[in-house]
Image: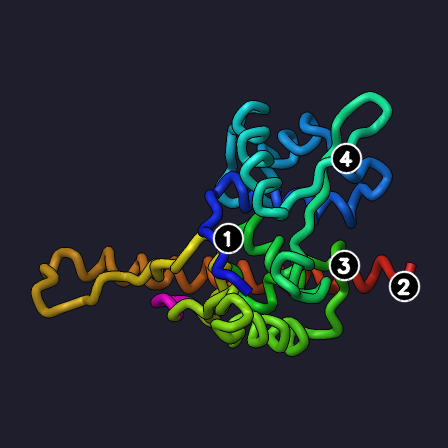
Amino acid sequence: MNPLRALSLLETRVLGVLVEKEKTVPDTYPLSLNALTLGCNQKNNRDPVLAATEGEVLAAIDELKAADWVIESSGARVTRYSHNIGRVLRVPEQSVTLLAALMLRGPQTAAELRAATERLHRFADTSSVEAFLDELAQRSEANGGPLVVLLPRRPGEREARWAHLLSGPVQAEAEPARTAQVRPEQDATLGLEGRLAALQAEVAQLRAEVAVLRARLDEVR
């Protein structure tokens, strides 16, 4: 398998939206350019939030089509687009789902990914998510190399986050090393920052767990 070129942020957003909408709104999939642009600029469940024009999205589609990431089909009135990620990367549906969540929402923990993909694919537990992530991280160079990476855990985080590598190597958002040169008047601020980071990480984890519980309650109902 030949090495794949690094994708731009908008190209990964296009692919992530196509995977998401294939599962959540199958009646309107493949997507029109307008629907795809709206999905790229969606404010919820997106990180970062974009404001791409239809022209920019179309240019990204053209680049993706040239590399077989996207397939164009002509409908009765409008051209529509679908993704071809599974075949390009030679990975199963579960892996495509996880990659899409990372492309749409940025780095996440395994627990957060399980909650984020609940509507796309129902993983049995967090361990099963980690198993697919490990496979993606350990892909040999002969198969195109790793597709995800486990980032170093940042200060205040309870769990490490995963990131996709479709846009090239990921630079860890590590905090600069704290040294003895920190001024005394900064100590209180740094302590508050650490506690705030820990609380934010805990809230994110709790939200992921609540999302899973809600999904299970919906099944019972």
Residue indicated by mark 4? 73
User: Label 4's element?
Assistant: strand
Residue indicated by mark 2? 220
**Label 4 Cα crowd, 10 Å radius (few <14 / some 14-19 / many 20+):** few
User: At 51% from the left edge and 73% from the top edge, which residue is drawn?
Assistant: 142
**Label 1 Cα crowd, 10 Å radius (few <14 / some 14-19 / many 20+):** some
* Separation of residues labelled 4 and 2 (CA atoms): 39 Å
What main secondary structure does the magenta stretch of the protein show?
Answer: loop
Q: Nearer the viewer, residue 74 or 171?
A: 74
Q: Amino acid at mark 1?
A: Gly
Residue at the far right in the pictured view? 221
Residue indicated by mark 1? 106
Q: Amino acid at mark 4?
A: Ser
Residue indicated by mark 3? 214
Which stretch appears magenta? 153-157
**Label 3 Cα crowd, 10 Å radius (few <14 / some 14-19 / many 20+):** few
User: Label 3's element?
Assistant: helix
